[in-house]
Amino acid sequence: MTEITTSMIMSKVVASWRATSICLPVTVFCISVIGCGALPQKPGANQVEPIKETFSEDAAKSNIVTKVILKADTERIEQLEREIARLKVELTRAEETLVAVESGLQSGYTRADAVKSMAEAQIRLEKTTGLAPWHTDKITQAQDKLKTAQSHIDAERFGAGLFFIYRVNSIVKNVNNEAEAIRTSPNLLFVKKKRANLRDGPSTNHKVVTTLAQDTPLFLEDRSEKWVLVRTLSRMVGWIHAGLVTREVPESIGG
C-alpha cells in the first residue's frame, strides 16, 4: 500500500512539473506582449512623433493682444485714408484760391465776409476744444491757422484769409466726427486719474508703454482679473488697471 501511494505521489509531481514547464513560457510570453503594448511606443526611423499642442493662459492672452493690434492697424490705415482725402480737398481749394488771386478775382471777397467767417470759425473751434480736449495737436494746428487767417485779413488779403479759415473748419469737422464716433462706442472708457500707466502686460511688473493723461478716451478690448486691455485713439494697445478707468464721460467734455 505504501509503494502504491508513493508511486502515485511521484506521478502527480511529474505531471505537475510538466504542466508548469509548458504554462510558464506561455505565461511569460503573454505578460511580455501585454506589457509591451502598455508601454509608450518609440517612433521608428520613418515615423514622426506626434506633437502635443498645449495652449497656456499667457498664449491665449498673446493671441488676443495680436488681434487687437491688427485691428488698431486697420483703423489707423482707414484714418490715414480719410486724412488723405481731406488734404486732397484742401489742395483743390488752395489751387482755386491761387487762380482767383492771379486772375484778379480776389476783389470779390469783402472784409465783412472774412470777419464773419473768422468769428464763426473761432466759435466752432472753441466747442471742439471742449468736446475733444485730447486732440491738442489738431486744435493747436487749427489755432495757428486762425492766426494766419487773421494776418491775411489785416493785410486786406481776404481771399487768402478765407482759405485758411476754410482749413480750420475742415480740421474742426474732422475732429468733431471722431468725437461723435467715440461717444457712441459701447466699449468707451476714460482715464479717471491724473496720470495712468499703459503697460505691455496685465501686471505692474510689465513694461510701461506710455503714460496717459486724465480724461483720455480708451476702447475696451478684453479683461484679465483686475486689468483691462485697451486701445487708444492713436492706435496704441496695452493693459491698464481697471481702477484707473471709468465709463462715465468726464465733465470736462460735457459729461
Image (spheres, grey):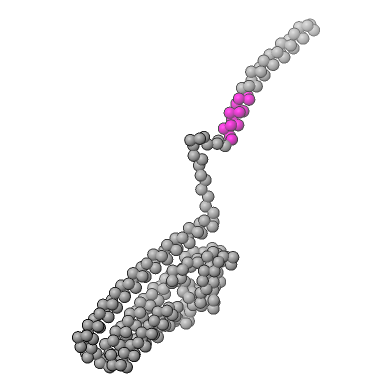
194 on left or right of 124: right
Which one is in front, 63 or 77?
Answer: 77
Which one is in front, 230 or 167?
Answer: 167
Q: Which quadrant of the view contains residue 158?
A: bottom left
Q: Which quadrant of the view contains residue 139?
A: bottom left
Q: Position of residue 86 (x, y in %)?
A: 31, 75
Compared to 153, does 231 lie above or below?
A: above
Q: What residue lies at 48% left-to-right and 81% top-to-bottom?
A: 251
Q: What residue lies at 32% left-to-right and 81% top-to-bottom?
A: 167
Compared to 174, does 148 lie above or below?
A: below
Q: Where is residue 60 in the image (x, y as percent from the top left)?
A: 50, 57
Q: How many marks?
A: 0
Range drawn in magenta:
27-39
- State the predominant SS element of the stretch in magenta: helix
Let me know if residue 60 appears in the view: yes
Asked if residue 221 lies in the magenta stretch, the reply is: no
Q: Position of residue 198 (x, y in %)?
A: 52, 70
Q: Position of residue 208 (x, y in %)?
A: 54, 69
Compared to 116, does 24 lie above or below?
A: above
Q: What residue lies at 59% left-to-right and 65% top-to-bottom?
A: 205
